[in-house]
Image (cartoon, rainbow, N blue to C red):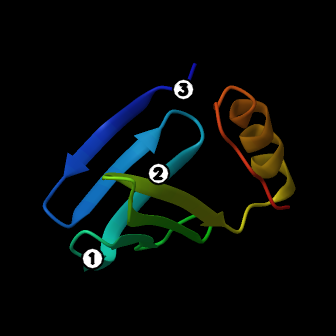
Amino acid sequence: MLTVYKTGLYFNEASFSIQNIVQLSLKIDERVENKTINIIAVGNPPFSIQLNWNLANENGGTAVTFTINAELNMMMKMMAAGHSKNWPIMKRKD
């Protein structure tokens, strides 16, 4: 189990630590209402990461696509692969 601590949440920024793994600060890079949200790592991240949400009207509802782009070293790739097996929908590119 992963433990998240030292969290800081603000309107456009968030920071947190995952015990014995990473300390990360994120900020909203782009926000287009009802269309897209792009978040990037700031400060001194241990790896490059970008989180993207794209929204689209579909059949009277909203379809959401969430994409994580990250440049991980081999150890982090192995850890992410192990945890991603529990995610219900996952397409992974190496």
Give the quarter of the figure containing the N terminus. Answer: top right
Q: Residue at x 48, y 72 (%)?
A: 44
Residues at marks 1 and 3, CA–CA distance in whole angstroms:
29 Å
Quadrant in the picture for residue 84: top right
Q: Position of residue 94 (x, y in %)?
A: 85, 61
Question: How many other residues sit within 10 Å of disc 2, few (<14), some (14-19) or many (≥20)?
Answer: some
Q: As drawn, is 91 to the left or to the right of 7?
A: right
Mark 3 lies on residue: 2
Judged by depth in the image, the label closer to the viewer, 1 or 3, is 1
SS of the residue under disc 1 = strand
Q: Residue at x 51, y 58 (%)?
A: 65
Q: Residue at x 65, y 39 (%)?
A: 89
Query: In the rendered structure, are the residues bearing label 2 and label 3 in contact, judged by CB atoms less than 8 Å apart?
Result: no
Residues at marks 2 and 3, CA–CA distance in whole angstroms:
13 Å
SS of the residue under disc 2 = strand
Mark 2 lies on residue: 23
Q: Position of residue 54 (x, y in %)?
A: 43, 67
Q: Earlier in the sequence, mark 1 or mark 2?
A: 2
Q: Residue at x 43, y 43 (%)?
A: 17
Camera-nearest residue between 34 and 40? 34
Residues at marks 1 and 2, CA–CA distance in whole angstroms:
24 Å
Q: Earlier in the sequence, mark 1 or mark 3?
A: 3
